[in-house]
């Protein structure tokens, strides 16, 4: 894990092929692909217009025109789920970017050569890590009101802290290594060291943690929206659909299944994606990434006559 | 001992930091508190009145010191909306939320620990795959959904086997009808407990596998004459306890979103409902004290977990490592 | 106890690591198994103990004393054994690899610690950190023998004497001991039940060069006193020469040469062995100097200990013949010492 990775097009192809060749990786790729496609399609087309409320068909059971039924205002459940995939995709992507940035910043501080800076940032992370996401969201919701920004902000803070804590040991090992020392003596600055030497060393941790943070952001969105501090009213999201489906429980209980199922399948895909990516991109676990073995060939067979 | 003192100092510093953070977030972030509290169509006079009533016209440091001094004396202030003491409200609600959290944790441990152990013990690759999928899928279920599914199965009125109360909490609480109070928390506790169990299972498996690594104490115990199962359960599990204690702490914190959602779904008047209501009503004094109180609770929990973790590992307890 | 291994194949996942090894250990004989990292020597040791990772599959035959650990079964009839019978509990199922039947977990566990003792490579990792030294050494006694506490303590104390540890280590925990002392504890735990076979899997690799010699000499004298057999695994010729009378050279999962250790070192026949031995000779000079430099660090360990049985007086002179073989085992071992 100490060797720096060279990211080339060939490597990406090998990694993608390896992920595809395994069941969990293939599931993750298929689901995430489907999510992306549905999100794109929903920009142009949904089975029913989002705002078309069908006053005569409220709380409707699934039918040819409303595949998953309608909610209390007569809006089409499937259309809202499809449109919701857009919002959740944006929230997940923003969470990955923001929590990644915050996490890397904290990692950089935690392994910095200034002892005071390092110990203060470690202490801050240790203390704040025990604050639940929902409290951060509630705190943010007071000034900002219910909005997707609250979800992204709360998740980014919570998972940025988490990422920093999980990635610290590997980062510390890299920061104290001789190649970083030599890079520093060659005049490389703190930021350069972080990007060139520390990030490549914590890439496996990053892959797993960031995809998990994306998954958890989907879960958090569902919970927070239901509590009324997530995305605003009238904005399509899976959390919105799930919260709406609660009211359907007495009318058509099976409809309750769909939004929750969508969330669960998406989160599973995100969690598996990180694991699969780590395994496929790891030269130790993935023989396809290795070049010729270190052992000279005459050491292998052909010496059995000596036995 | 030095560690304990350092940790306590850090705890005190964190408490102070959180109180400043909560205070600052509610003042300095956009929007005048009094305007927000008064609502959208309030007169200027009403805003000024509110500002004076809650001392919001004073400089921030004075306000902060006043609030902090109150906290130190156990005075959490008055709710702007109900006019009742925040402390009393929190206490009454906590009597529902904390039993719920503890019950959820019991469910999570009772389900997650044995499954996590089984996932390491089994030699059957197919069973291992099943456990893997179970842990991943279980952790991906939104608490709201698991609550809904349980309602559909067991909730009185809506479920297939309507055996358990699905809505509300007895008005006379634990003193009046402890049996009914307990029953009304069973479904909510399972709803959050099952989801948390997946996390516990994953961590248990990871911790055990880590300890059972080649050439470690589990191998040594086997070399002394234990079977693999014995070695994992007697040596591995004991060595995993410090990590598992940390995991329980993390689970506590990660469960709280689910608990709030579930309280809402099952119409339980707990802390979650209180907090969400106060945030919705812009009841800043109450929100400020409640958020601080909860944050302080989780900081205390973190402190206890860290100290227990250390006490359980003789290498750390002796001050080696770090 | 005699050990006979015939045509042993071990594979991990899709990859076969050991390709048909034959190996014999006579009663009371000390046999070495040497080879570069990754040659499969640890796998062979683990197959004797039943400590292979759970995804490992193996075939061939292993007999230890009278017990057949791995029996070549007729193809097909092993499958029923694997699924049915044996109480149906996972850990107790026998494992089937190829067409051979591996002993079930209970049988192996009864052998381990009673008839077969194991000394591990890295005592810092192997010793249970939450147990006292007395509990660690006493564990095999506790598991296999019906002794009173007093009897057990007596045996443990006698064992502490034998491995040259002071009696006050009894209630200490592993982290309070030095690396050398920890390995003495490991040896005591392996030998406390007077097993008939000791399997030492690179027992000195994690130690500095002076402690290495003390530990090897201690192990040899204790094994000989007990009249037990020993399988000693190493990648270090100097250690091999001290510890064994006969040895097998393993490379890439195959035995390339075997014979009396001294003769084999003097006149290696197989190409890989020649390469290993000549590499060792050219490196001797360097590692001697390295050994001197390392001697300072080892001093405190040696001085806090009473002289162990079989300790030769000339500690410090010609200290190291530790010779890195392939890849960079030297770097690897220093890394482990640091841990």
Image (cartoon, grey):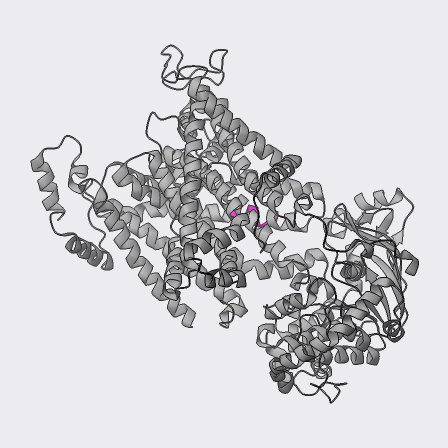
What is the span of residues highlighted in magenta in the rendered image? Answer: B108-114
Residue under the image location 33 percent in, 55 percent down: B296
**Furthest-left residue in this view:** B45
Residue C292 versus residue B75 in the image, above or below: below
Residue A76 versus residue A278 in the image, above or below: above
**Quarter of the image that includes the C terminus of chain C:** bottom right
Q: Is residue B113 magenta?
A: yes
Which of these two is toward me, A287 or C227? A287
Asked if residue A227 lies left or right of residue C198, the reply is: left
Asked if residue A264 lies left or right of residue B73, the reply is: right
Residue under the image location 52 percent in, 41 percent down: B139
Give coordinates of residue C88: x percent, y percent.
Answer: 76, 46
Q: Is residue B182 visible?
A: yes
Which of these two is toward me, C261 or C285? C285
Give coordinates of residue B101: x percent, y percent.
Answer: 43, 47
Q: Quadrant of residue B306?
A: bottom left
Q: Is residue A142 magenta?
A: no
């Amino acid at each position: 894990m100490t060797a720096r990775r060279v990211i080339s097009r060939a490597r990406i192809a090998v990694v993608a092929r390896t992920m595809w060749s395994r069941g969990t990786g293939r599931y993750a790729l298929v689901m995430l692909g489907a999510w992306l496609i549905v999100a794109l399609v929903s920009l142009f087309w949904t089975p029913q217009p989002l705002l078309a409320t069908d006053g005569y068909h409220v709380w409707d059971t699934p039918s040819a025109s409303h595949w998953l039924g309608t909610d209390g205002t007569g809006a089409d459940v499937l259309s809202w789920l499809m449109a919701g995939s857009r919002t959740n995709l944006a929230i997940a992507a923003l969470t990955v970017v923001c929590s990644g940035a915050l996490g890397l910043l904290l990692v950089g501080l935690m392994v910095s050569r200034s002892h005071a800076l390092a110990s203060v940032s470690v202490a801050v992370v240790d203390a704040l890590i025990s604050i639940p996401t929902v409290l951060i969201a509630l705190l943010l919701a007071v000034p900002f009101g219910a909005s997707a920004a609250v979800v992204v902000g709360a998740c980014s803070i919570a998972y940025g802290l988490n990422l920093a804590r999980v990635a610290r040991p590997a980062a510390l090992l890299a920061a104290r290594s001789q190649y970083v020392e030599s890079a520093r003596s060659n005049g490389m600055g703190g930021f350069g060291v972080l990007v060139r030497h520390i990030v490549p060393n914590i890439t496996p941790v990053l892959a797993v943690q960031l995809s998990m943070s994306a998954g958890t952001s989907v879960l958090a969105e569902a919970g927070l929206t239901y509590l009324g501090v997530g995305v605003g009213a009238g904005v399509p999201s899976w959390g919105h659909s799930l919260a709406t489906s609660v009211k359907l429980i007495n009318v058509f209980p099976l409809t309750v299944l769909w939004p929750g199922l969508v969330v669960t399948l998406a989160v599973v895909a995100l969690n598996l994606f990180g694991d699969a990516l780590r395994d496929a991109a790891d030269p130790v676990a993935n023989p396809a990434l290795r070049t010729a073995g270190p052992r000279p060939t005459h050491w292998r067979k052909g010496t059995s006559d000596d036995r | 001992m030095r560690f304990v003192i350092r940790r306590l100092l850090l705890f005190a510093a964190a408490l102070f930091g959180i109180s400043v953070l909560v205070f600052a977030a509610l003042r300095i972030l956009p929007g005048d508190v009094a305007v927000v509290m008064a609502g959208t169509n309030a007169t200027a006079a009403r805003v000024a009145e509110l500002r004076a009533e809650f001392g919001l016209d004073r400089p921030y440091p004075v306000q902060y010191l006043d609030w902090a001094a109150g906290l130190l004396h156990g005075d959490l202030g008055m709710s702007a909306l109900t006019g009742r003491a925040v402390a009393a409200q929190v206490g009454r609600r906590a009597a529902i939320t904390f039993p719920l959290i503890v019950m959820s944790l019991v469910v999570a441990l009772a389900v997650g620990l044995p499954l996590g152990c089984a996932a390491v013990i089994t030699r059957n690759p197919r069973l291992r795959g099943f456990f893997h999928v179970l842990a991943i899928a279980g952790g991906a279920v939104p608490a709201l959904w698991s609550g809904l599914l349980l309602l559909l199965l067991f909730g009185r009125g809506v479920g297939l086997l309507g055996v358990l109360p699905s809505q509300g909490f007895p008005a006379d609480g634990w003193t009046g009808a402890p049996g009914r109070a307990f029953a009304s928390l069973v479904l909510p506790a399972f709803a959050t407990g099952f989801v948390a169990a997946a996390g516990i299972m994953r961590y248990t498996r990871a911790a055990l596998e880590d300890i059972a690594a080649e050439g470690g104490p589990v191998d040594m115990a086997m070399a002394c004459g234990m079977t693999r199962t014995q070695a994992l359960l007697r040596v591995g599990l004991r060595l995993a306890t410090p990590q598992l204690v940390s995991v329980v702490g993390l689970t506590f914190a990660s469960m709280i979103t689910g608990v709030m959602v579930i309280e809402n779904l099952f119409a339980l008047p707990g802390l979650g409902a209180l907090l969400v209501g106060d945030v919705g009503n812009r009841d800043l004094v109450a929100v400020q004290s409640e958020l601080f109180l909860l944050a302080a609770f989780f900081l205390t929990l973190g402190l206890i977990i860290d100290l227990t973790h250390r006490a359980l590992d003789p290498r750390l307890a002796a001050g080696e490592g770090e | 106890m005699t050990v006979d291994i015939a045509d042993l194949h071990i594979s991990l996942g899709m990859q076969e690591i050991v390709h048909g090894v034959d190996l014999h250990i006579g009663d009371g004989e000390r046999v070495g198994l040497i080879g570069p990292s990754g040659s499969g020597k640890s796998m062979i040791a683990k197959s004797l103990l039943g400590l292979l990772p759970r995804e490992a599959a193996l075939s061939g035959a292993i007999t230890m004393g009278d017990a057949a650990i791995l029996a070549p079964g007729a193809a097909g009839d092993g499958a029923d054994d694997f699924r049915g019978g044996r109480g149906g509990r996972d850990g107790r199922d026998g494992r089937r690899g190829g067409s051979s039947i591996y002993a079930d977990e209970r049988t192996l566990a009864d052998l381990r610690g009673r008839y077969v003792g194991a000394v591990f490579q890295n005592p810092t990792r192997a010793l249970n950190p939450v147990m006292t030294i007395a509990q660690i050494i006493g564990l095999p006694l506790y598991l296999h023998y019906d002794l009173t506490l007093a009897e057990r303590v007596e045996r443990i104390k006698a064992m502490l004497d034998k491995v040259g540890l002071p009696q006050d280590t009894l209630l200490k925990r592993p982290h309070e001991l030095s690396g050398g002392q920890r390995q003495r504890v490991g040896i005591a735990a392996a030998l406390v039940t007077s097993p008939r076979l000791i399997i030492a899997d690179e027992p000195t690799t994690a130690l500095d060069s002076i402690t290495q010699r003390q530990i090897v000499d201690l192990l040899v004298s204790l094994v000989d006193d007990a009249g037990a057999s020993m399988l000693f695994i190493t990648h270090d010729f100097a250690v091999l020469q001290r510890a064994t009378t006969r040895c097998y050279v393993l490379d890439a999962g195959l035995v390339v040469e075997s014979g009396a250790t001294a003769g084999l070192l003097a006149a290696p026949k197989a190409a890989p062995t020649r390469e290993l031995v000549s590499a060792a000779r050219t490196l001797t000079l360097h590692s001697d100097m390295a050994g001197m430099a390392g001697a300072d660090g080892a001093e405190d360990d040696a001085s806090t200990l009473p002289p162990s049985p079989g300790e030769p007086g000339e500690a410090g002179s010609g200290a190291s013949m530790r010779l890195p073989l392939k890849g960079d085992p030297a770097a690897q071992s220093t890394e482990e010492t640091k841990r």
